[in-house]
Image (cartoon, helix red, strand yellow):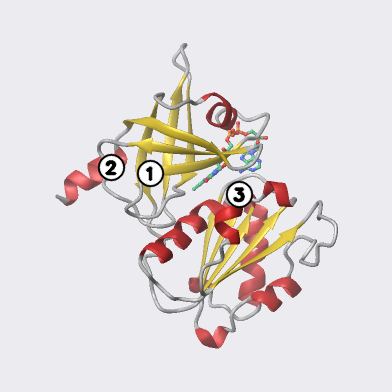
Amino acid sequence: MAGTALRGRLTWQTATVKSVADETDRVRTISLSVPDWAGHRAGQHLDVRLTAEDGYRAERSYSIASAPGEPVAITVERLDDGEVSPYLTQDVQPGDEIEIRGPIGGYFVWDGGAVPLLLLAGGSGVVPLRAMLRHRARAGSSVPVRLLYSVRSLPDVIYRSELSAEPDGVQVIYTLTRQQPPGWTGYARRVDAAMIGEIAWPVAQAPLAYICGPTNFVEAVAADLVALGYPPQRVKTERFGATG
Ligand SMILES: Cc1cc2nc3c(=O)[nH]c(=O)nc-3n(C[C@H](O)[C@H](O)[C@H](O)COP(=O)(O)OP(=O)(O)OC[C@H]3O[C@@H](n4cnc5c(N)ncnc54)[C@H](O)[C@@H]3O)c2cc1C
């Protein structure tokens, strides 16, 4: 059984696009139908492989946006000069087939638990954290959660209506780094040590932190949390690459 599950994760398989939904003007969620899916945990990712007509192949990783038990979905942000993300955000249509393999990763996962969660997202780094929030809701967990979400402007907020629902025990704090709407009273700068100091759960509560986003964001925020006294093994990180 374990062998079958492992083979399923490491083998490329064909997924069919079930639906696409625009989250912002640069970001799209793609729901997939995957015939041989072993199930996933909140925080894992999958690999997508695209093959051009001349045989050229490109592979990229994408966090799984859906909770365990929900259909597999990914949320992709378009980089205009990118190879893969423009195709996934502009061209892919329901009924199309794409190659995937997964789920992948066992470190940046949240299976549930009783300690407060501190989630820190930079841009599309919110994707696996959203899977954790959905998992919490589906499991009926009341564990307290704070999500600090750094994003350029309000229209760039991914999952905006879902996050604004703020279920009991979940607090979403935005920092809008480039543009703020009139009357904005929230944070309006890149995440820094002072901001982390204001929003982080006290170390005495033994919180767990998950940080995801561009590499420079993740490294700066992780360093700030460790400086605040968070033990490094309680600060889990996922780097999407490049800079923010
Ligand atoms: C574990 C993991 C999970 C990921 N999950 C997601 C996800 O849920 N959603 C998502 O949109 N992306 C995610 N990514 C990033 C994704 O794998 C690709 O790197 C991204 O889509 C760009 O691919 P591309 O082919 O379009 O651009 P490329 O052709 O690879 O790069 C084009 C240009 O953009 C720069 N660049 C590459 N990656 C980034 C980046 N992340 N931010 C800013 N500039 C960049 C490159 O330096 C280059 O200049 C994840 C990456 C990892 C490692």
The disc labelled 2 sits on which kind of residue? Answer: Trp
Q: Does the Cβ of the disc 2 residue fall within 8 Å of ligand 1?
A: no
At label 2, counting other C-alpha atoms closer than 10 Å, the crowd grade (few under 14, some 14-19, many 20 or more) is some
- Gap in angstroms between the C-alphas marked 1 and 2: 9 Å
Pick the front one: 63 or 32: 32
Q: Is residue 120 left or right of residue 60?
A: right
Q: Quadrant of ligand 1?
A: top right
Q: Are marks 1 and 2 in contact (CB under 8 Å)?
A: yes
At label 3, counting other C-alpha atoms closer than 10 Å, the crowd grade (few under 14, some 14-19, many 20 or more) is many
Q: Is residue 1 left or right of residue 55?
A: left
Residue under the image location 50 percent in, 56 percent down: 130
Residue under the image location 65 percent in, 35 percent down: 79
The disc labelled 1 sits on which kind of residue? Answer: Val
At label 1, counting other C-alpha atoms closer than 10 Å, the crowd grade (few under 14, some 14-19, many 20 or more) is many
Return the x and y of residue 110 as percentages of the image width and height. 41, 64
Q: Is residue 106 left or right of residue 213?
A: left
Identify the element where label 3 is drawn: loop
Residue 72's label in the rendered image is 1
Identify the element where label 2 is drawn: loop
Pick the front one: 91 or 2: 91
Residue lying at the far left in this picture: please name it.
Answer: 1
Identify the element where label 1 is drawn: loop
Residue lying at the far top in this picture: please name it.
Answer: 54
Q: Earlier in the sequence, mark 1 or mark 3?
A: 1
Residue under the image location 52 percent in, 75 percent down: 169
Q: Nearer the viewer, mark 3 or mark 2?
A: 3
The disc labelled 3 sits on which kind of residue? Answer: Ile
Q: Which residue is mark 2?
A: 37
Q: Which residue is mark 3?
A: 158
Q: Earlier in the sequence, mark 1 or mark 2?
A: 2
- Gap in angstroms between the C-alphas marked 3 and 2: 26 Å
